[in-house]
Amino acid sequence: MTEKEQFLGVLEREFPTTIKVLKAFPAAKADIKPHAKSKTAKDLAWMFVTEEKASEQALDGAIEFGKMPQAPGSLPEVISTYETAHRAFVEKVRRTPEAELNQTVKFFTAPKQMGDVRKMDVLWFMLMDGVHHRGQMSVYLRLADAKVPSIYGPSADEPWM
């Protein structure tokens, strides 16, 4: 199995869980945020789209964070956009030759520091950062008095036994 195949396998396994977490969030509480420095739930959900867009830009040769699309007005629209954008991202990765994934792109290597990073490593970074944001979203769910679905195992709201 190639690294690209491994990445696509993990990406496709994580996506349904992320969608399940996002869809569990009450749309009427999309503006909730646990702290003044935190993002709103809707803005946190939008991170899934922007991280995949940044990954697409990496595949194209340069990430331009200033050229990310703006979030739509509602959480359901964010989720719908993510579902559509995710399918396009998966296809872009599938079409990218393996050798191209080993080329480098400028990406963060430390605070306020950019360096050459292999495109495949950027993709893995963004995927793992998305898993991190999904964990944050599960905390937001609890703060919104919503049910937290099973992610990697049972939750208090979705026990396995």
Image: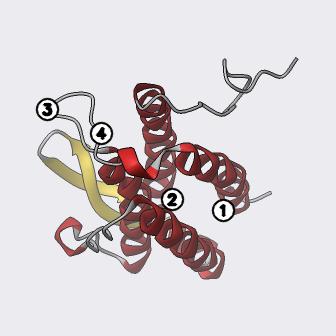
Mark 4 neighbour density, 10 Å: few (under 14) some (14–19) many (20 or more): some
Residue at (27, 44) in percent of width and height: 40
Mark 1 neighbour density, 10 Å: few (under 14) some (14–19) many (20 or more): some
Kind of residue at disc 4: Ile
Q: Secondary structure at mark 1?
A: helix
Kind of residue at disc 3: Ala
Kind of residue at disc 1: Lys
Kind of residue at disc 2: Met
Q: CA distance from mark 1 to mark 3?
A: 39 Å
Residue at (28, 56) in percent of width and height: 107
Task: Report the number of discs.
Answer: 4
Q: CA distance from mark 4 to mark 2?
A: 34 Å
Q: Secondary structure at mark 4?
A: loop
Residue 80 in the image, given as x and y percentages of width and height: 52, 70
Vertical comparison of 52 with 9: above or below: below
Mark 2 or mark 3, whichever is nearer to me: 3
Q: CA distance from mark 2 to mark 3?
A: 34 Å
Residue 62 in the image, given as x and y percentages of width and height: 29, 73
User: Quadrant of the image for the C terminus?
Assistant: top right
**Image position of 108 (left or right of 112):** right
**Front in this rendered view, residue 119 or 68:** 68
Mark 3 neighbour density, 10 Å: few (under 14) some (14–19) many (20 or more): few
Q: CA distance from mark 4 to mark 1?
A: 37 Å
Residue at (23, 53) in percent of width and height: 115
Q: Secondary structure at mark 2?
A: helix
Q: Which residue is mark 2?
A: 120
**Front in this rendered view, residue 43 or 63:** 43
Q: Which residue is mark 3?
A: 36
**Front in this rendered view, residue 57 or 27:** 27
**Front in this rendered view, residue 122 or 17:** 17
Q: Which residue is mark 1?
A: 4
- Please say if the residues under marks 1 and 2 sit with CB atoms less than 8 Å apart: yes
